[in-house]
Amino acid sequence: MDKNIDRGAAVNFLRELNRTVGENASLQRLIADYEEHLIFHSQQMKYIYRREGQQPIYSDNPPFVPEVIEAKVAGIDIDPDQFSPIDRIALQIIFQYYGDIIRGFSNKEHIAPLIRRLDKRIDHIRKVIEVRDADELWEEKNITIVSLKDVNMQMRKVLPLLFCKRLYNDKKADDDSGTYLNIIIDEAHNILSEESERESEQWKDYRLETFEEND
């Protein structure tokens, strides 16, 4: 247990998970249960699960894991087949975020604002991306045109990164000196501009480095 971890980390994680899977009834019951019975003792640095008419269970006691975690998690009913590939990306981000936080690998204050914007970003991605097999992008053609005419400015800067990173990695893995990959970007200054005042320097540097690496 780390005193810097939010005492509501367990419930907050379940709320994020519930929002991503689409308001699951079994998750909502677990959230309500934990909100009512699970507390974090900041001085003793341990979780306490309060039971009506019984002694509370402390997280450093052996019954805590099987009774408070495993038995209750077993009651969650989620069909993994319901998730699209993009849903799985969102879930991976949530698991990675909370996993890093509880292991002390990430600073919550720095990353939490990004997680709060996750739902909106994922909605933007759903509108413009459909996951298919890589071969369908080319359809045995030598040239494929990707138009960003109807996407918003946020996606207009993200999508080229995704395309180029994936195409470049696939080309390296292919290791075929007899074929070539040429990426032509019309109006490239709209994507690679160093003049944008709406972005952090780190984000602009990362975008430029990605294209320089692929050059």
Image (cartoon, rainbow, N blue to C red):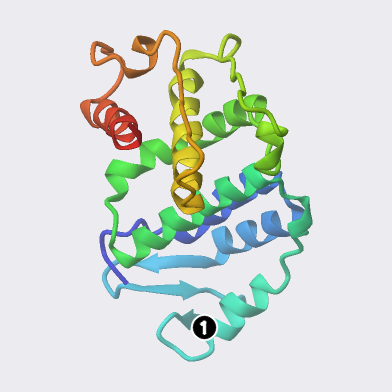
Q: In terms of secondary structure, where does tag 1 sit?
A: helix
In the displayed structure, would residue 36 be above or below residue 15? below
Q: Quadrant of residue 198?
A: top left
**Across the whole image, how many numbered discs are drawn on residues?**
1
In the displayed structure, would residue 112 be above or below residue 95? above
In the rendered view of the protein, which quadrant contains the N terminus? bottom left
Does residue 144 appear to the left or right of 153 in the view shown? right
| Along the viewing direction, whichever of 6 and 139 lies nearer the viewer | 139
Does residue 71 appear to the left or right of 153 in the view shown? right
At 40% from the left and 85% from the top, the residue drawn is 60
| Along the viewing direction, whichever of 44 and 112 lies nearer the viewer | 112
| Along the viewing direction, whichever of 169 and 66 lies nearer the viewer | 169
As shown in the figure, which amino acid type bears the numbered disc 1?
Phe
Q: Please rate how many residues cluster around mark 1, counting C-alpha atoms within 10 Å: few if below 14, some from 14 to 19, many from 20.
A: some
In the displayed structure, would residue 149 be above or below residue 192? above
Q: Position of residue 190 (x, y in %)?
A: 38, 11
In the rendered view of the protein, which quadrant contains the C terminus? top left
Q: Seen from this angle, which residue lies furthest bottom?
A: 62
| Along the viewing direction, whichever of 146 and 12 lies nearer the viewer | 146
Q: Which residue is mark 1?
A: 64
At 52% from the left and 30% from the top, the residue drawn is 121
Q: Position of residue 124 (x, y in %)?
A: 58, 26
